[in-house]
Amino acid sequence: MPASDLQSSLLTGLSGATPATHHASRLNWEEVDWLQVLGNWCAAAIIILVGYWLAKWISRIVHRALSRHVELTLANFLRNLVYAVLMVVVLIAALQKVGVPITSLLAIVGTAGLAVGLALKDSLSNIASGVMLIVLRPFRDGDYVQIAGLEGTVEDVRIFQTRLRTADNRLIVLPNSTITAAPITNFTAKPQRRIDISIGVGYDDDLKKAREVLLKLAAAHPKVLREPATTVLVDKLGESTVDLILQAWTATPDYTTTRSELTEAIRVQLIDNGLNIPYPQRDLHVYHYNGDGKPLSEIVVKSVADDGDK
């Protein structure tokens, strides 16, 4: 909309005259109905003040209602969103009261909003992903997760980004759009976890005895759960060992320490019970040939035989 037309429309609202009348008497300020102008501006000011109070009041009610059912972060975001929308409505009503053409204003605002949306598409994607994470709750603060190949404890889920703390106390900041597009593994979502420990014993060892030793060891550990029951499975026949897997269940917070203690005890108990944990072994056969391709072993044997005949 041309600036002159917008100015004309604004002054029309101020004076209560039509655009043609205004153009005819633009320089004659004595014809302006200043009482009406003052009334319009006072009404606009009242609209802004009352609208501001209503927007605050409604946003507080929305926040109070949402905080009972959703995360606090999402409740705060939606409260601010409701407040912003209401204030836009209030400002439009106030501008309309002073004579600003709303149709043209909405067109300008819509065009500006489209331009801003295209410029901030990545940020808007993070906001949408943040809302999804807060609503769907694939993880919570304090959970230990793996996201896009990165592991850590969730410190904070925000509208734009999520913060993880690694085991060695490094901070990882992930955009929310990356999280929703990647597989998420939550290691602490369930109250119990299964410990899988692979053990290799010798081919000459008694597998029944090895299984009994492992089951007895797990049963004696105070943090290993009785239900689900502990099992020992034969996994595969390796190059140097028969590989067994001890599967024991423990409470999720005790997973790391229990696994470490079981691994140490397995090594001690297997050795104490006469079982072997073989090192990797390979049989290497070496063949030597002379220049004409004849095996040297035949030459040596023949030479020894000739010496014996002599």
Image: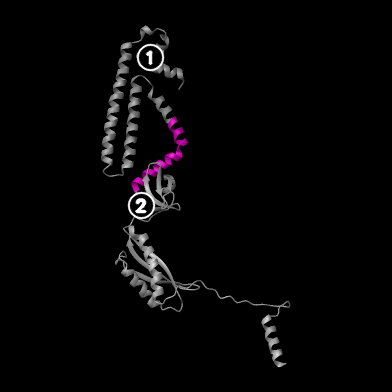
For residue 249, which numbered disc appears in the image? none
Depth check: 6 or 88 in front?
Answer: 88
For the magenta stretch, what is the residue range?
112-140
Callout 1, which amino acid? Thr
In the shown orientation, is residue 61 left or right of residue 275?
Answer: left
Crowding near pointer 2: few (<14 within 10 Å), some, many (20+)?
Answer: some
Depth check: 103 or 183 in front?
Answer: 183
Residue 184 position (above or below residue 289) = above
For residue 143, which numbered disc appears in the image? 2
- Judged by depth in the image, the label closer to the viewer, 1 or 2, is 2
The image quadrant where one finds the N terminus is top left
Q: Position of residue 292 (x, y in %)?
A: 73, 78
Q: Residue at x 39, y 25 (%)?
A: 103
Label 2 residue SS: loop
Crowding near pointer 1: few (<14 within 10 Å), some, many (20+)?
Answer: some
Q: Residue at x 32, y 31 (%)?
A: 86
Q: Position of residue 208 (x, y in %)?
A: 38, 77
Depth check: 130 or 256 in front?
Answer: 256
What is the number of callouts on the image? 2
What is the residue that sits farthest to the bottom in this orientation? 309
Instruction: Report which quarter residue 58 is drawn in.
Output: top left
Callout 2, which amino acid? Asp
Q: Residue at x 37, y 47 (%)?
A: 155
The residue tagged 1 is 18
